[in-house]
Image: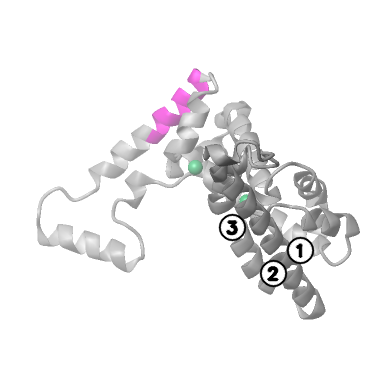
Amino acid sequence: MKEEIYTIPVMDAFNQDGCPFCAMRRKLEKDSIDFMLGPSYMEDDIRMETDRKGFCRRHLVMMYEQQNRLGLALMVGTRLKRVIKNMSVLPKETSAKRKGFFKKAEEAGSSAYGTVLGSCYICDRIGGTFDRYVSTFFYMWPKEKELRAAFEKSPICVPHFAMLRESGKKYLNGTHEGEFQAKLSETEDKILAKLDADLDLFIRKFDYRYKDEPEGDSRDALPRAINALSGEDGA
Ligand SMILES: [Zn+2]
Ligand SMILES: [Zn+2]
């Protein structure tokens, strides 16, 4: 089974704090940044792809912060040359030819500027592996007790709750799907209710009348609520 090779990173993510699916993405992002700035950028097939797609701002900035200025300059340099070349074929004046160009691009479902705006090699790389992790999670779900136990305690963020709700329909069926969806809702309800109470307490503590009330788990309720509502950075 191709999924077996991913069972370890999936289980590892469940043994960390916070949303395990955010943890998977965070790890994939870190590995991808290291990979890009390792010897990979000298490999022709990878460079062909990075030249064609480019990178999003978030990932350019993350690579810039890694101090491999030559490696990044080489990648950005050839991408820039590609953009200059692609720009040169964009029609310049208002003309029937120009209108035809943009209409054709729209019909093909893409922006006429797609080749100059690009996408992101790293986002795509993360997305591809993350999808395999999700399929591995569902492959493990029916039989791994350890995973189920960890799942019940996991603060799944709202975006990943929605992702799991949809993916569960795709990867599971019959009793397994029913059980999974029920457990997912039950877990999420509990997590969000606790967070709601913690955040209420956090707010109350600004009022002097409650200054002697024990702070419980309220201290980090605000960053936890931000992560719960929007997923963590890079996730
Ligand atoms: Zn998440
Ligand atoms: Zn990106």
CB atoms of marks 2 and 1 within 8 Å: yes
Please name the amino acid that badge 3 sits on: Val
Which of pointers 2 and 3 lies earlier in the amino acid sequence? 3
Q: In the image, is residue 77 part of the stretch drawn in magenta?
A: yes
Secondary structure mainly formed by the magenta segment: helix
The amino acid pointed to by label 2 is Gly
- Return the residue at label 2: 168
- Classify 10 Å Cα crowding around label 2: few (below 14), some (14-19), many (20 and above): many
Q: CA distance from mark 2 to mark 3?
A: 15 Å
In the structure shown, which secondary structural element does the residue marked by tag 2 occupy?
A: helix
Choose top left, top right, bottom left or bottom right for residue 182: bottom right
Q: Which residue is mark 3?
A: 158
Work out whether residue 170 or residue 189 is closer to the camera in this orientation and state it. 189
The question of residue 206 being in magenta is answered with: no
The quadrant of the picture occupied by the N terminus is bottom right
Q: Looking at the rendered structure, which numbered label has been put on residue 138?
A: 1
181 vs 90: above or below: below
Secondary structure type for disc 3: helix
Residue name at image x 59 percent, y 41 percent: 210
Work out how far the residue at label 2 is from the one at label 1, CA to CA, in angstroms. 7 Å
The answer to whether 201 appears left or right of 48 in the picture is: right
Is residue 233 among the parts visible in the rendering?
Answer: no
Mark 1: which amino acid?
Phe
